[in-house]
Image: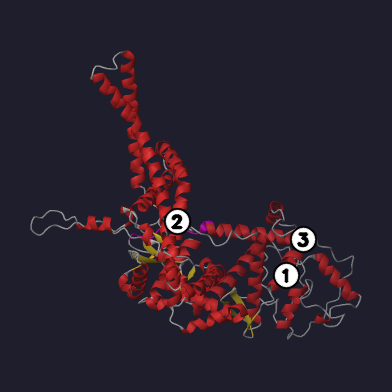
Amino acid sequence: MGVGVEAGAQAARSRALAVLRIRSRALAVALLPAAVAVILLAGGSSGHLMGRSWDLARWIMGVAAIVVLLAAGAIALVVARARPAVSPTVAIAEESAPDLYRMVRDLADRLDVPAPSAIALTPDCDSWLEDRTHPSHGPPPQESGDEITGVRSLTPGRSRRTAAAPVLVIGSPFLWWMRVGELRAVLAPVVAGTGPSAHPDIAAARRFVRGLDAAVAVTSAPRGPVFRSVLAGVGWVARLLLRSCRGHAAEMERGVAAAAAERAQAVDYGLRIVAQEQVGLAYAGWDRLLTRVALPAWRMGRWPSRLDAGVVAALTELSRRDRLAEGFASRLGERPACDLLEEPGTIDEATSLLAARLFHGGPAETGPDWAPVAWQEYPEEVVDRKWRTDAARLHRVLDTLGVRRAPDPTPPHHDPPTLARVVDHLTDPTTTDGRADDRTDGRADDRYGEADAVDPYAPDATLTDPSTPAQPEAPAPHPEAAPHPEAPPEPEPYKAMAADDDDEELGESGSPHSAALAAGLTAELAREEAATPPISAAPPGQGPDTGLWDDTGLPLFPLQPPRTGRELLADHVTAMVCCAAMDTAGALPGLDWLDGPTLLVNGERAADLAPRVLSLVEDGDPAPLRAWLMDLGIRPEKPVRLV
């Protein structure tokens, strides 16, 4: 083990020295004109190098030396004062997690490496060491006067310089899903990295590379034309040095990682193999929870306040469904790593808010439009509101397109918000005519009754309550006396949206009605997002580590690309179906830990709804959806309650 550790550390030191040599060469290039100017001046003062040509050379080299030194000083100032990037985290004070700090220090003692200076949590399934020794990353200096002489004390500055140990960043899902022993085994190779990081050459090389990276970020920031032109040269030099250091810096980090992994072999090796399986499982559960469960809530202005506890429920549900994960649920009887925290609920809430900011770009503070939601309130606060909001948006777009169920040319005309209105609009007339011919020939589907029975969900059917007695049919007027009303003209928005849409998102089989409705939904969502006020940054002193990272470019890590028109249309039609099921068939909104919002019919998940909605949206075929509605007793002709 000692040979492997020494080999990795030696490789890292050699690469660090290569990085420092590049820094020394850059300094030598900056000092070269000044050195030549000094030689020329010394030669002239001693009586050598006399003449006009030498005088001209002295003037040229003197001016060049001054210009190069000023430029080098400006570059060095930008690199020194640039703020290195820091990962957004939630700082964990030792008072709030004494057991966690004790476990990490014991682990460092077993590995014979320095202990990390602090611990922080990140809403991600990863762990690493982060250097935060830059002056801008520390607390503001506090001046303390000497009681006898009254002079300024040097203790704060000295303590800042000596606190060179990196910060241990732990993925918050690990604390809730893993057991204490598993967390210790996973953190062993990470904590072991503090040993090579304490070497002066490696630390200096890292500071140099991080300073160059920060300088590039400073020069790339949007500024005025004057500052942009001045910083262009600084950025060019910083990028040139970064390209020169890139290979050596990467090999240095590989050497540090190899040395740390070799040193950690002696600590819980067998348990670490099992813990690595938990890392992959936690990553899968965390990704599914964010994209399927948290993202719909964030879009509704609600952020789940217990995401880390939710990942445990999601992975437990996964172990219940998947036989490959059955053994993982048996670990839940052991002590979880979150017990190492004094107040796990408070820390879970802080990391959940940070996750909402990073992955969705939510505000830094709670408010009427950005409030926390508990898991037990999720079905009512998120699922029900989401479905009814989407259904209301769908009918607003239908009103804009002038869609009517009955030809009534008298404006204004607004049909009630019914599911039948949506189904009729998306139904392809060719499929409806084909089924009508089948019913005429006596080959109707037995799901809808006899061949001569009237289909209650057909587009031309009269929507009446079955309990109402049938009215006598009025005699038909004479064909010559009855005028033939012309069909209402196609509204202009429908034509514009259908012309602008290229049908690529809905596929080659997408109907013009579906394309226009999808385009209308996309435009409506764009208007709603444009009307949303901009997100303000967190006030000073509030939020997780607000003084360490720039939150102007949120979200930093978007979970999903923008939804296509087909996806928007399918989501809104699904929401309308769920609203009809809740209002006419007694269905309930529910939460599935792996699939997000779900419809509960008689206490069971309605898992077969999605393909039937896609059949209507993409193919214009309403038969599968109508059969599903009839089986569950859902009345599409009844108006639903909207938001």
Q: Mark 1 and 2 residues: CB-CB less than 8 Å, in contact?
A: no
- Is residue 348 at least partly visible in the picture? yes
In the figure, is residue 11 to the left or right of 595?
Answer: left
**Residue density around tag 1, few if under 14, some if 14–19, many if 20 or more, within 10 Å:** many
41 vs 95: above or below: above
37 vs 455: above or below: above
- The residue singled out by tag 3 in the image is 509
Q: Which residues are magenta?
A: 530-540
Q: Amino acid at mark 2?
A: Gly
For this orientation, the residue located farthest to the right is 441
- Is residue 590 at least partly visible in the picture? no
Looking at the rendering, in which quadrant would you find the N terminus?
A: bottom left
Q: Position of residue 288 (x, y in %)?
A: 56, 70
Q: Amino acid at mark 1?
A: Val
In the figure, is residue 204 to the left or right of 457?
Answer: left
- The residue singled out by tag 1 in the image is 423
Depth-wise, is mark 3 or mark 2 nearer the camera?
2
- How far apart marks 1 and 3 lie (CA) works out to 17 Å
- The residue singled out by tag 2 in the image is 255
- How far apart marks 3 and 2 lie (CA) works out to 56 Å
